Image: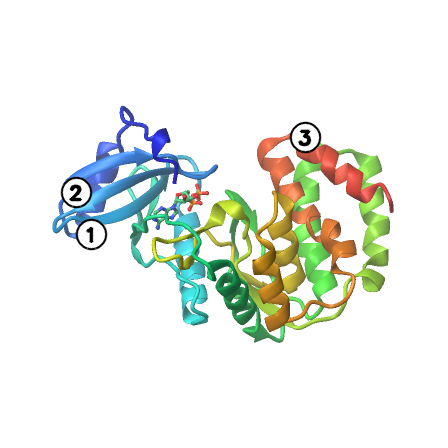
Amino acid sequence: MNWNNILSNNMIPDILVTKLESALDQTIESQRRVSGGSINQAAKITLPGDRSCFLKWNTTADPSMFFVEEKGLQLLDAADTGLFIPGVLATGETENGIGFLVQEFIKEGRAQNNSAEIFGQELAALHKNQHEQFGLDHDNYIGRLPQSNKKHQSWIDFFIKERMKPQLKMATDSGKLGTTTVSHFQSMYKQLPDIFPEEQASLLHGDLWGGNYFYDQNGRPTIYDPAVYYGHREIELAFTHLFGGFSGAFYDAYNEAYPLQPNFNQRKDIYNLYPLLVHTNLFGSSYAQQVKGIVQQF
Ligand code: ADP
């Protein structure tokens, strides 16, 4: 949390305050807007007894986004890996369609000596929660875009049909990518059986980059804002590398606890086509260039 970015003159909408007070059955004693993520608006609210909560809301997105986020957080919590998941106090929707989620407020701290190592071990423990099929019993969202979790026996089918194709269609429909890129994707699909090693489906956070975890004031790895499903764990590891990467101690500990199959580095970019397509659809053309750069080899 960057407290320098507090937005003081921009309050929580009154209708949302009223709804929150009835959902929490408590008075909101104070509120401070804080810089949220790239998708939602966020605030720190204080309840009686000096209890701080983290609130995020969205006036335009489908309010079900927050219900499925809560389900995802529950799945991660139930996996009981040691990873700290801030508890959810309420999710809901105002009469005019503002969706919201309230979590306990966790103060960001700093990594202690072994925090990154513990994070690596705990993520490996999460990935050891496995399932016979890829997907999930419900769909959810990646950012504010719908994410289909229709189940498949094969990772390659899941990756192509539920991850590549919907995002690629969105990008071509909006003119961000063209037919040449689509034909590169099609030839890549044919080669995937030689590229992806077979593994069981692992429970994934689903959106694990540097902005979706921090260490709390005791140095505990804390994760939030998931897009949970059962998938190939390499897609999760690949995404951690996309925007700068996590610490070496994190990767060493992960690999010791649950070694990756050889040559993972050569597959990373292909997995990262998913977040890059999502970023192309959410934020635009510089990401489209990165997508093209990866698929043009096919
Ligand atoms: P978005 O859905 O808009 O991406 P996030 O859930 O990622 O929003 O939250 C935005 C930022 O708020 C995070 O990067 C983190 O710094 C902070 N944050 C998230 N959850 C909490 C929490 N429970 N307590 C305190 N700060 C939080």
Q: Position of residue 111 (x, y in %)?
A: 44, 53
Amino acid type, residue under disc 2 in the picture: Ile
**In this view of the protein, which residue sits in the foreground, 270 or 152?**
270
Residue placed furthest toward the top: 9
Q: CA distance from mark 2 to mark 1?
A: 9 Å
Picture quarter with ligand 1: top left
Q: Which secondary structure lies at badge 2? A: loop
Q: Which residue is mark 3?
A: 286
Q: Residue 28 shows which numbered tag?
A: 2
- Give the mark, 3 or 1, whose residue is nearer the N terminus: 1
- Residue 253 appears in view: yes
Identify the residue at horizontal 70%, vertical 43% (top origin): 168
Identify the residue at horizontal 20%, vertical 52% (top origin): 24
The mark closer to the camera, 2 or 1, is 2
Amino acid type, residue under disc 3 in the picture: Ser
Q: Residue 24 shows which numbered tag?
A: 1
Amino acid type, residue under disc 1 in the picture: Leu
**In this view of the protein, which residue sits in the foreground, 212 or 254?**
254
Q: Which secondary structure lies at badge 1? A: helix
Q: Position of residue 223 (x, y in %)?
A: 44, 55
Residue placed furthest toward the front: 113
Q: CA distance from mark 3 to mark 2?
A: 42 Å
Q: Position of residue 102 (x, y in %)?
A: 30, 49
Relative height, residue 169 to residue 208 (above, below): above
Q: Which secondary structure lies at badge 3? A: helix
Q: Position of residue 247 (x, y in %)?
A: 57, 53
Relative height, residue 86 to residue 42 (above, below): below
Q: Quadrant of residue 37?
A: top left
Q: Quadrant of residue 31?
A: top left
For the image, the number of numbered tags is 3
